[in-house]
Image (cartoon, rainbow, N blue to C red):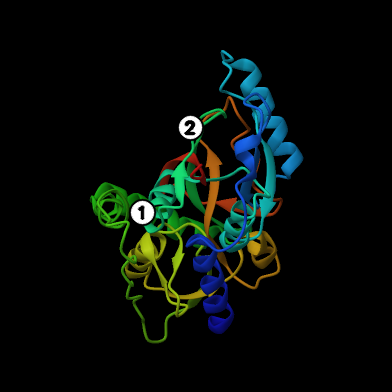
Amino acid sequence: MKKIFVLLMICAFALMTGCGGGNEHSNKKPDAPIKLGTIKHLNVTETLLDTYFEKAASRMNQTSSMHAPNHVFFDNMVSMLAALDAGQVDAISTYQSVSNYLVAQNDKFEVMNDRVPKVSDSFCCAMREDDTALKKEFDDAILKLTADGTLAKLVKTYISELDYTATPPIVDMPKFDGAATIKVAVTGDLPPLDYVSADGTPAGFNTALLAEISRITGKNFELVQIDSGARAAALTSKLVDVVFWAVVPLQDTLAPPDCDKPEGVILTEPYFSDEVTHVNLKK
């Protein structure tokens, strides 16, 4: 798996540093819906997501620069960046912290002057619905880390004051002899939130938070790298016990709060929120 990931990252960095692909979206009419690359959701289809945005846009005061996009799903960040570079999508949808990282890492990218409704998401962990005891442990740990200020410190270290031009720091995961081991899915598709280094080592904000949850619960966490598009299947098939990022919309004007929760899945307390932003190639 590590060798495959390294090859994918090499391809991604090659694309990001100027190899191949034209910027076709520069010829698109200003009032035409953009093709917006998006990491595949847990339970929402491209068509349904388009519908949510169309309804939201219709309720807003329309201007010539605001339109609902046409979403195109991708299983991982590598393939999405490749599609952007090739002009197959006009922009990619991600989060403010991730766009900061992408832009700082390569001057080929810029944050798009958005022509779509502004939304924000809250991040949670996803588990199978019969793992109520595990959910409670996570919930209690997240609430404790919020109350004692640890979560705010992690946000400061790994997001708000992070040097986005550098590689996110590696995180040491606690190990407890004889303790239960929980398999947790990480993707690496939302750096520096969900990040995996070139040698296959998980790092970044999510991993740092998971290490704190491990210390509180006394459980060992085995990190399993998967594509974002496989998160739901990995959880329901019991390949993993926890998906360490699922999102719910903060605004009920765009989509129902449980719209992306598959049947048989429960979500923990939220541990972070971020605004959705869009990145395109510089014209």
Q: What is the spatial separation of the Cα atoms under label 1 and label 2, in whole angstroms?
A: 17 Å
Q: Residue at x 63, y 32 (%)?
A: 255
Residue 101 rendering spot, x and y as whole percentages? 39, 54
Q: SS at mark 1?
A: helix
Is tag 1's residue or tag 2's residue first in the polypeptide sequence? 1
Residue density around tag 2, few if under 14, some if 14–19, many if 20 or more, within 10 Å:
few
Residue 181 rendering spot, x and y as whole percentages? 49, 78
In this rendering, is residue 210 above or below 280? below
Tag 1: amino acid:
Ala
Check residue 113 in the rendering and tell me which mark sits there, or answer none.
2
Q: Residue at x 63, y 33 (%)?
A: 256
Check residue 46 in the rendering and tell me which mark sits there, or answer none.
none
Q: Are marks 1 and 2 in contact (CB under 8 Å)?
A: no
Residue 233, located in which quarter of the rendered image?
A: bottom right
Tag 2: amino acid:
Asn
For disc 1, the marked residue is 104
Residue density around tag 1, few if under 14, some if 14–19, many if 20 or more, within 10 Å:
some
242 left or right, relative to 143: right
Residue 109 rendering spot, x and y as whole percentages? 46, 49
Q: Residue at x 36, y 82 (%)?
A: 176
Q: SS at mark 2?
A: loop
